[in-house]
Structure formats: C-alpha cells, structure tokens
Image (cartoon, rainbow, N blue to C red):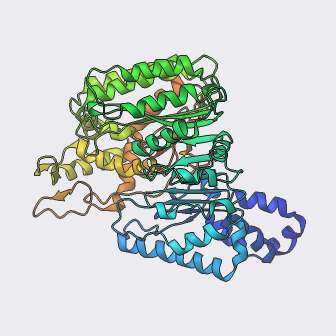
C-alpha cells in the first residue's frame, strides 16, 4: 500500500498534521491505524479538543468545526432508546478514562474541553466525574475548559486553577476565584455564583483580582440575574476599579431585563454603571445582549438601545447576538422587542462592519402565542426586511428560534401544511403529516385538557427538535454564547412524534410515526424556509451562510444555482461548505 511506504516518507509531519486537522473524527481514527508515525500524528489531533455531548454529529457534516472536535457521544441510531444512548455515552467515557490512565502521556495532548449535559435527562450522573477530575488535575497544556450545564462540581476549582499556566478560557463559580485565575486567562464566563458575601477575614487580594480582570479580552456575564448582580456588585463596590482606567474587553455579554414590579432595578442600574463607567465600549468587537421587558407600555428597551449606540461608540463591532428574555407570551411584547433590536441596528455607527448576526427569540414551546395573527406576522417580517439591509457587510445570519416563531402563527403553519411547496417530495409528505394532525391529541398543560393537535402545536414540536441541533436555551443559560454558534457542528436531533407535550393518537388508529420520519419533516421545513433565505440573499449581498432553527443553508453560490443550498436536509445537496469560527 503506497500510503504506508512512499507518502509518509515524502511528506513532513507538518503536512500530515495539517491534513489530519481537516479530517472527520472517524477518518483520523483510520489514519492512526496505518503505521506508528501516522498514529502519533493522529492521536495528537484526536485528543487535542474533547467534546462531551450525548449525541452525534449530523451525517455528512463537512463543516470545519466537525473536524475540530473529537466528540465523546452516543448512538447514531435514530431509533435507539434513551437507555442505549446513556449506556454508550457512559461506555465511551469509561474507555477514554482507561486510555488516559494506562497511557498518561496522552494527557499532554488535551488543550480544549467542552462539556454539554442533557438537561432533560433523568440520569444525574451523565458525566464521568473521575474522568473530568483526571483531565483537570493533569492536563498541563489545557487552554480552554467549558461546562455548559448547572453542575458546578465539574468546573475548575480553586486548587486546580493556579496550576494551569496555559489556560485561556474558563468559568468561575465564586468571587474569590478571580484572584486564583492564571495570568494567561483571556476569556472569562461568570457561572452560577455562590451568593455569599465576602467576609472581612477572607483573603481578598484586590490588586490581583483587578489585574486578572484588566487582562481579559472577553467577559461573559451570566444569564442568571442573581449571579450577574453578585459579580457586578463585587467588582464595583469591593474591587473598586478606577473609572479613569476602563476595561478593554473585545467581547462582552450582558443582560438587561426589566422584570415584573421592577424587582431587578438594582441589577439594571449596575449593568448601566458597569458598561458606561468602567468599560471602553469602542473596543468591543463582539457583543451579546440578553434583552427583555415584561412591563406593558414601557419604553426602557428603546431607551437602552438609543443610549448604547450614543454612549458606546460601537465602531469596531464584527459580531452581534441578541437573546430575548421574557415571561410574556403575547405578540405585542415580541414585536416591541423586535422594534428595539431593529432600532439598535439602525442606530449603529456607519463604520462597523458587522459580519455575524444571531437573533434568538423565546417563543412559547407549544406555539401558543396570544394574538398570533397573520397581519402581526407580516408586520414583524417587514420590520426585519427593512432593518437587515443596514448590515451591508453581513456574511453569517443565524436565528435558532426562527421556525419556532413562525409556528406561533396558525395562518403561516396551515399555509405550509396545505398550500406549501409543490415539489413532488413535499406533496407526498405534507399529506402524510396532515393525516398525523387529524389523528392525534395533545395534553394542554395550561388547561389540563386533551385537545386536537393543530398545525402550530405540531410544527412547534418539530421546531424544538430541529433547534436542538445547536445550542439550546438551557445551554445559553449555562455559559454557552450565541456568538460561538459556529464553533460546534450541528448534532443529530430527532422527534418520535409523540414524546413532546404528551402527543397521543386516537384509539383504533395504527400509528407508525416515529423518529425515522423526522428527516422527511426536516426537509419539508427546509423547503418552507427557502423563500425566506432567498429574501435575505437579495437584501444582503455578501451573505454566505444562513442558519434558521438548526437548518443550515449555503448562500455563497449566487451564480450557478441562484439560490440557497440546504446542507443537511436535502439529499441532493453536496455539503462542501467550510466555515471556521473558533
């Protein structure tokens, strides 16, 4: 075989390293089986970036992020039961633990670790804590350690932090960890913090903690209000940074939410003081805003948008992400939020070349939005049609909640079901999904009654499953950032047509709907989205990549095909797009 004789001798290791970096995970494993020299090269790539998630990468995923990570996941069988996924996930972690224990030299290759935990699972021990403790305590080349769940025990401890001299990215669990951070740290996430006060006899090293903050390039404040309140109060009132020397963050995630009865007025005041008095917003390259207002007829969000653009001088922005935070499930609140987002985009300075935009709404999981009328939907659509062309340099547009928002308007989903795409494929399957709706009930949790499934409920369930290919709202709540949606490849997520909102079929109906039919549903939905993506392409001349509710579109080819290509939900598409974002 020429691969084992001529090629390894001709190619230097640097070339093989470069090749291995672009290979999917299984191909790297195959490369390791060729000979010892390629084994060493492949092993370095396999262990460099470890990603723990109970899932698998979508089949035929050629995004560069798919080659970047080694996924310790579960079964690719869409019909596999939860118990089998749990067993495989645990078994793969056990094998990894055994490998690292038998051959400790492998620990030096590990540079990045990302841990996702299924928040909907009943299994409280999904992650092998012995494995994680081994990695945290012995991987001296560790550069990034991120945990996207509520298990604080998995995070780096005070004892481990000072020994990781190359660490660049992590989260803190309590305030005193600030002074324990290594000088190499550049990207800090504020996790769910302990809310205790700093005692007078605590060993608070104010100067060291401030130095660590001033050395940061990125600060991600927690989506948890109490944690952010605790952190900002500590920074402003205990550390007392001088207003004359502002933080030079390149990336910032903040939360601005106006809650019922104005319960969080102190937090909003602290947020405004922090960003305007202590941060140089003109240095920002990436900005994530968690915004919301649950007070009727309130103008706080438009005022915040105006003030941010006027005071912030956001002249260097390249990436922008918006996340809606609200408890209200009424159209007028959602539209007011959209207006505030559009207002901020329109008021941005003329100089920033924003290339990346993510907008995540929080529609009702069951699609039951009050006043979900067609005219209201059209008004929201027209708003974004008018606003988006402002971002003339936009290359990446992402909306993890797009189809879930569409599912809130019955006229839109019914039109999709009965008057949707006329291609041969959709004509065949839309009638099948119509039959499903006619033969099924669901449990309405608000009333406790069994009701007929209607198109908004059906497509809301589908939207929920599609969106789980990416960061979920739970992930975002626990440190994940929508600025990093391209850093991980899409993972397999399906729906069995029954396990969501207690869907059940009529007595006597022989129901054969299961996960194996979900790819067909995903393709139908991708065809529905096609017109919307084409509209974005017309208004955004540089747009090359668009993701709507976990459906990935290549929009870079405007000449040969003239339209977007669905990368994973249309068998006729060749997924050859490479998108890099780490």
Residue 205, above or below 255: below
How far from the left and from the top, in percent, is residue 137? Answer: 63, 69
Up-down relation of residue 390 to residue 192 (above or below) = above
Quadrant location, the N terminus: bottom right
Res 385 visible: no
Q: Residue at point 40% right, 51% down?
A: 474
Q: Residue at x 59, y 54 (%)?
A: 203
- Name the residue: 69% across, 71% down: 107
Q: Tell me which corner region of the image, top left, top right, bottom left or bottom right, holds residue 215.
A: top right
**Relative to 186, 76 lies left or right:** left
**2 vs 502, nearest the viewer:** 502
Q: Residue at x 68, y 54 (%)?
A: 182
Q: Is residue 172 above or below residue 399?
A: below
Nearest the eye: 335 or 500: 335
Residue 177 x %, y %: 57, 54
**Is 533 or 483 nearer to us in this picture?**
483
Query: As rendered, which of 544 and 132 lies closer to the eye?
Result: 132
Q: Is residue 349 above or below residue 198?
A: above
Residue 66 x, y percent position in the rendering = 60, 56
């Amino acid at each position: 075989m020429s691969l084992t004789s001529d090629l390894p001798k001709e190619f230097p290791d640097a070339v093989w390293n470069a090749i291995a970096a672009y290979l999917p995970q299984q191909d790297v494993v195959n490369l390791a089986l060729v000979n010892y020299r390629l084994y060493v090269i492949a092993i370095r790539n396999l262990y460099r970036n470890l990603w723990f998630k109970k899932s698998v990468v979508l089949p035929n995923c050629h995004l560069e992020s798919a080659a970047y990570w080694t996924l310790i996941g579960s079964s690719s069988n869409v019909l596999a039961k939860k118990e089998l996924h749990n067993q495989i996930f645990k078994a793969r972690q056990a094998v990894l633990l055994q490998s690292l224990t038998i051959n400790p030299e492998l620990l030096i290759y590990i540079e990045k670790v990302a841990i996702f935990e299924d928040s909907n699972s009943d299994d409280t021990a999904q992650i092998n804590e012995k494995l994680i403790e081994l990695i945290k305590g012995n991987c001296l080349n560790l550069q990034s350690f991120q945990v996207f769940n509520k298990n604080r025990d998995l995070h780096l401890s005070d004892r481990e932090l000072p020994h990781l001299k190359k660490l660049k990215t992590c989260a803190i669990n309590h305030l005193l960890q600030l002074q324990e951070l290594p000088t190499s740290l550049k990207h800090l996430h504020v996790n769910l913090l302990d809310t205790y006060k700093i005692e007078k006899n605590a060993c608070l090293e104010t100067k060291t903690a401030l130095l660590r903050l001033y050395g940061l390039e990125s600060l991600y404040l927690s989506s948890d209000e109490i944690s952010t309140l605790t952190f900002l109060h500590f920074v402003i009132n205990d550390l007392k940074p001088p207003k004359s020397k502002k933080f030079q963050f390149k990336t910032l995630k903040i939360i601005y939410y106006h809650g019922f009865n104005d319960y969080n007025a102190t937090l909003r005041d602290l947020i405004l003081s922090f960003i305007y008095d202590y941060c140089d917003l003109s240095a920002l390259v990436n900005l994530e805003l968690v915004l919301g207002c649950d007070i009727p007829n309130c103008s706080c969000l438009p005022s915040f948008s105006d003030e941010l653009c006027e005071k912030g001088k956001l002249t260097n922005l390249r990436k922008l992400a918006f996340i809606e935070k609200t408890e209200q499930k009424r159209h007028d609140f959602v539209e007011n939020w959209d207006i505030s987002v559009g207002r901020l985009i329109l008021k941005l300075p003329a100089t920033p070349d924003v290339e990346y935009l993510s907008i995540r709404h929080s529609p009702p999981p069951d699609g039951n939005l009050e006043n979900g009328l067609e005219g209201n939907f059209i008004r929201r659509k027209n708003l974004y049609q008018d606003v988006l062309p402002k971002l003339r340099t936009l290359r990446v547009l992402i909306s993890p909640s797009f189809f879930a928002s569409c599912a809130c308007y019955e006229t839109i989903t019914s039109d999709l079901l009965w008057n949707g795409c006329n291609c041969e494929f959709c004509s065949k399957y839309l009638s099948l999904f119509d039959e499903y709706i006619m033969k099924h009930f669901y449990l309405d949790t608000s009333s406790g009654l069994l009701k007929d499934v209607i198109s908004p409920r059906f497509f809301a369930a589908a939207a929920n499953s599609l969106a789980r290919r990416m960061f979920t709202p739970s992930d975002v709540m626990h440190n994940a950032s929508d600025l990093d949606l391209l850093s991980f490849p899409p993972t397999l997520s399906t729906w069995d047509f029954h396990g969501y909102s207690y869907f059940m079929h009529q007595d006597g109906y022989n129901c054969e709907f299961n996960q194996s039919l979900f790819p067909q549903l995903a393709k139908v939905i991708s065809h529905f989205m096609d017109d919307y993506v084409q509209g974005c392409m017309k208004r955004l001349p540089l747009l090359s990549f668009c993701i709507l509710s976990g459906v990935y579109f290549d929009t870079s080819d405007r000449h040969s095909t003239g339209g977007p290509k669905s990368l994973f939900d249309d068998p006729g598409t060749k997924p050859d797009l490479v998108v890099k974002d780490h």
